[in-house]
Amino acid sequence: MSRTRMTWHNEAKELPASDWLFHAVPGVGNVGKLVVDSLVDKHEGKLIARILHPDLPPHATLDSDGLLTPPCLEIHTVTLPSGQNVVTLSSNFQPLSPAGQYEVASFLLQASKEAGIGRLLILAGLLAEPGSEAVHVVCPSKEDSEAMDKMGLEVSKEHPSAGIIGMTGMVSSLAPTFEQAATCVIAETVGTSVDTVAADRMVAFLNDSFGLNLGLELDNTKETAEKLRAFFDLDEIAELPPEFDKSEPDSQAFYA
């Protein structure tokens, strides 16, 4: 029996077919998450579903309507300036266990395959030295790599040299087992908690490389970055146990 379940919102009953699903969760510099959250904020994305799992951190939060919501991964539909409709998945959390990450990744991939999602773009950051501005394209299958080659994109065979862990790694690497096309796009970052410069670089890369018009500028990502910084400030969490570590998670150690 699956421990993962989906709740539907705003009259949605299923994931819509789309050419693209943008996926990002907390990680190094929160680069991918900043891009995806900015898309939702800027273009007034519509919440259609939440993915729930018991291994998500026990941290309920207030949503934009001031309602208390359980920890989850949120799925939105977003209409880009071109009129193209895309799907996004983002979260402030990842499952705390390897099994939970595997289960949620598998659940998402099954759902996206059934919905007819053309390609998952999994967005992430990679810790690098100051001044490093590379964006790496990483593929989980020969077919994905050949598709990127046809688009004129160089597929990295060396970075990230230590691989990818967490939800980013699971969704990316498991995609071929569900016959779901997927590409991981990783921007180098100095690893600050919310790296707006790297996020802006990733936006430019996505627009240029995938023929997209995300309609985002640095001001948009900075505005969303302030929201993320406020969320990760744990000082106002009710019922925070004394043993809880209030320091910022060492995302460099756990996520790409």
Image (cartoon, grey):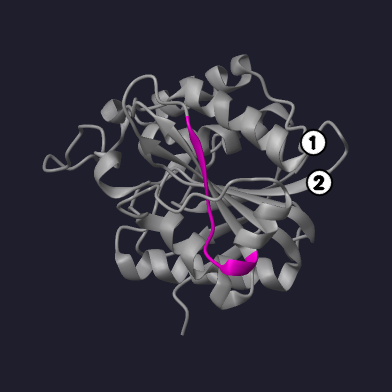
Contact flag, marks 2 and 1 (Cβ < 8 Å): yes
- The residue located at (59%, 38%) in the rendering is 36
Give the answer, above or below, for where 32 lies relative to 172: above
Residue 210: image location, x then y, percent: 72, 42
Residue that badge 2 annotates: 85
Residue 97: image location, x then y, percent: 29, 63
> Which of the 4 image quarters holds residue 234?
top left
- Real-space Cα separation, disc 2 to disc 1, in angstroms: 6 Å
Residue 52 is covered by the magenta coloring: no
Residue 138 is covered by the magenta coloring: yes
Mark 1 secondary-structure assignment: loop
Give the answer, above or below, for where 176 lies relative to 171: below
- Residue 222 left/right relative to 194: right
Task: Tell me where the magenta segment starts and ends, as one range.
Answer: 134-143
Q: Residue furthest right?
A: 83
- The residue located at (75%, 47%) in the rendering is 86
Amino acid identity at mark 2: Asn
Mark identifier at residue 80: 1
Query: Dot 1, how many residues are within 10 Å of its Cα: few (below 14), some (14-19), or many (20+)?
Result: many
Residue 226: image location, x then y, percent: 47, 20
